[in-house]
Amino acid sequence: MRILFVAAGSLATVFALAPVATAARNAGHAVIMAANDDVIPAITGVGLPAFSVSSLPIGHFVNTDRSGRPVEIPTVPEEQIPFTGRWFGRMAAAWLDPLSELARDWRPDVIVGGTMSYAAGLLAARLGIPYVRHAWDAIEATAIDRGAVEELEPELAELGLEWLPEPELFIDVCPPSLRPPESHPAKRTMGIRWVPVNGQRQLEPWMLARSERPRLCLTTGSRVAHDVGDHDIRRRSYEFLRSQAVALMELDIDLVVAAPDKVGEALRAEVPGVRAGWVPLDVLAPTCDVIVHHGGGTTSLTAMTAAVPQVAIPQGAVQNLGAQRLSRYGAAITFFGTDGSPEAIVDACREILGDSSYADRARALSREIAELAPPSQAVDAIAELV
């Protein structure tokens, strides 16, 4: 069986698909993962064959329309959700023809696309082969889809469709207690275990063992990376890390800032005593007592898997709903908008460290995740479609 996986322009979209893609390859199936130039190293870095369909970075589709005119990112949270769908739709439209050329040469039997990899469904409909939608995280995309439909109206009309193609299978990675009431439309849904994937490095002993003091991890995922996102996002992410690290050092904790090495070097110069640099989060998370992060879906699920309470500061309306459900469950404290001052986040960390109920709820979510099917069973389900 030949399976074409379609990521969508960022490291997180690659890492979320990697467990099923790797399981498929280990089972003897032929696998290719397609994406843009920026994230090809992430695909090859986890040992998967990679194919580039665009030299344009993700920021191009966020900031410009199809004709190349600049667009403004909405400041009103309610408008950010359909806006997100529109720029993912623009990316899908740009990728569809290159993906079709790849398919003519390689002839996949099935297409697997991430939550908002809309080109995957369009390509499968164009080829008349099964389409599988694979969740990236615990964040629902139903409202985002509406924006994508508006943007992709010409492509959908060409296929005789008024809405996005319905997948034969939806692979869900959200633990049952946090699943949204409105499920993704699909002919069949299966839940699988979240398996954290991220870039690796040579480990140091301190990364593997719990500290004598409570360990707190601070991260903004790939947002602060020197080669991902636009300059303004990187600048804001770095300032968040710096100001928060300074504030958190007042606690009696072992503070680790998980960030690219260049960022870590700058932080160590400004914040004496902090551990900062590239640390694989899948290795570090089980040694942590709290993880403070930007609301990213993959970071949040990695913390859940490791049974670690969280302090989440979502960076937009898209992440808000998932973060709210996590807080209502009792495994996190969430701040929205300007509420997340350094002082408030320090107080939240102090509360979590002093109240064992947060850790209890985090352990309950981790048990739920562990009881879900492994990625290999998703491969079996995909094979049944073919």
Image (cartoon, rainbow, N blue to C red):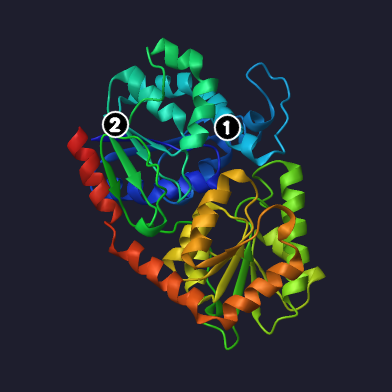
Disc 2: which residue = 110
N-terminal-most mark, 1 or 2: 1
In the rendering, at what x and y percent does residue 322 appear? 51, 52
**Residue 354 placement: quadrant:** bottom right
134 shown above or below 332? above
In the rendering, at what x and y percent does residue 139 appear? 48, 47
Q: Is residue 203 left or right of residue 83?
A: left
Q: As shown in the figure, which amino acid type bears the numbered disc 2?
A: Val
- Could you tell me which residue is drawn at 70 percent across and 52 percent down? 337
Q: Nearer the viewer, residue 120 or 311?
A: 311
Q: Is residue 127 left or right of residue 332?
A: left
Question: Which quadrant, please, contains the C terminus?
Answer: top left
> From this viewpoint, which residue is outermost toward the bottom?
212
> From this viewpoint, which residue is outermost toward the right?
270
Q: Is residue 208 visible?
A: no
In the rendering, at what x and y percent does residue 261 appear? 67, 61
- Could you tell me which residue is drawn at 66 percent across and 55 percent down? 336
Q: Any mark on residue 331, and which?
A: none
Viewer-side label of 1, 2: 1
Q: Is residue 96 visible?
A: yes
Q: As shown in the figure, which amino acid type bears the numbered disc 1?
A: Pro
94 shown above or below 356? above
Query: Badges 1 and 2: C-beta atoms under 8 Å apart?
Result: no
Q: Label 1 neighbourhood size at 10 Å, few (<14), some (14-19), many (20+)?
A: many
Q: Label 2 neighbourhood size at 10 Å, few (<14), some (14-19), many (20+)?
A: many
How far apart are labels 1 and 2 at the CA level?
28 Å
> From this viewpoint, which residue is outermost toward the left?
384
Question: Which quadrant, please, contains the N terminus?
Answer: top left
Secondary-structure class at tag 1: helix
Disc 1: which residue = 82
